[in-house]
Image (cartoon, coloured by chain):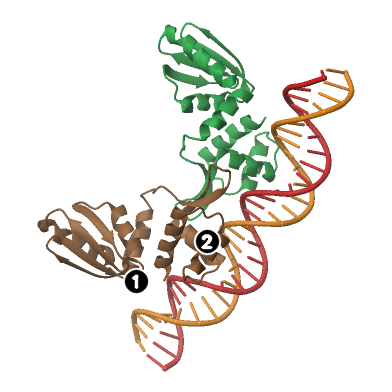
Chain colours: A brown, B green, C red, D orange
Amino acid sequence: MKYSRHNKILELIHKQEVETQEELAKLLIKNGYNVTQATISRDIKELKLIKIQTATGKSKYAAETHSYQSITDRFIKIFKDTILSVNYSNNIIIIKTLTGCANAACEAIDALNLDNILGTIAGDNTIFVVVDENINVNKLVHQFNDLIQ
Amino acid sequence: MKYSRHNKILELIHKQEVETQEELAKLLIKNGYNVTQATISRDIKELKLIKIQTATGKSKYAAETHSYQSITDRFIKIFKDTILSVNYSNNIIIIKTLTGCANAACEAIDALNLDNILGTIAGDNTIFVVVDENINVNKLVHQFNDLIQ
DNA sequence: CAGACCTCCGAATAATTATTAATTTATTTT
DNA sequence: AAAATAAATTAATAATTATTCGGAGGTCTG
């Protein structure tokens, strides 16, 4: 699944310097994602990753510091594509996603900067969203459902 | 001269979307700078420019939002290479530079974030630095001279 | 189910960028 | 001012990245 792979890409470039797409391909294959450079080129475009210069004159891929505008579309798309269900109890919303996609969807939630959210946490296929007051839970669940349509 | 060209590159990518180095080469040639793609590749590395995705899915070169660390070295080098003389009168420091390099050197001054500077302005080969108090001029002139060695 | 229409992806290849090796230009040293 | 050294540049090419084309699989609709 694409979003799970995207998530892994972000994880990989965060914890080590990845200089080329071939290198990233090898890393992903090691992690069980079978991809070619061509696909990674597309992933990088979707993720809007950039190649920056490191201190040592080498270059590496990095996540652009969010230009929170058009990126919202991507997040909404991630939502639609990965979220399976939204439930809640008291002030916690429990969101089920496709396996390996919780993180991507959770970052999307964070980036959307919705009101009344105290915090979020993502596992592999589940997100917990903690809301400030019980009374606001419904509003948020509605917002989520609106996003998913 | 390299720094004058660098400055023009920054100007060009600021005012229009430049997608490739070849394109940039053509623009520079139009502006009287005779260069090849190879040189531009090196310029881009020195300037730490990055290629980012535009809203329309294309890509363009952009100046990275300053990571004011190792970049200082670059500025100091610009100083050494482009500044011809430093003089002053009252609270104004007059810096002469190589033709076309005043802007680059001036940005360097700005980026160095020195104390007591009220403002700077650059022409083609001259920079005026306005200092807050007459008494601080000497200190700054010394700082400049130290940078140049 | 068949057909229309998606999305995702790989192989091959086109396009772009970085580097090498050689040359020219500029700077410093003697 | 000549020689020596360093810096900047180019042409050619290697390396890297993006795209095209085609196929596989999924979903929706009649």
Q: Which residue type carries mark 2? A: Leu
Q: Is residue A113 left or right of residue B67?
A: left
Toward the viewer: A64 or C29? C29
Residue drawn at 31 percent across, 53 percent down: A111
Residues packed near mark 1 inside 10 Å, few (<14), some (14 to 19) or many (20 plus): some
Examine the image and state in which quarter residue A84 appears: bottom left
Element assignment for label 2: helix
Q: Are marks 2 and 1 in contact (CB under 8 Å)?
A: no
Residue lying farthest to the left in this orientation: A135
x, y (%) of residue A3?
Answer: 40, 66
Horizontal and vertical percent position of residue D8: 70, 34
Q: Which mark is residue A99?
A: 1
Q: Where's the N terminus of chain A, which quadrant?
A: bottom left
Three-letter amino acid code at the position of disc 1: Thr
- In space, the residues marked 2 and 1 are separated at their CA atoms by 22 Å
Give the SS element for disc 1: loop
Residue C30: horizontal and vertical position, in percent? 82, 19
Disc number placed over residue B56 in the picture, else none: none
Check the residue under mark 2 and report the chain it is in: A
Against B30, residue A91 (above or below) is: below
Quickly name the residue at label 2.
A24
Residue at 47% over, 55% down = A13
Query: Given the image, what chain letter belongs to the residue carrying mark 1?
Result: A
Q: Which quadrant holds the C terminus of chain A?
A: bottom left
Q: Are marks 2 and 1 on the same chain?
A: yes
Q: Is residue B48 left or right of residue A108?
A: right
Asked whether the viewer can see residue A146, the reply is: no
* Residue positioned 21% across, 66% down in the render: A94
Going from N to C along the chain, the mark reached first, 2 or 1, is 2
Is residue B26 positioned above or below B149 on the image? below
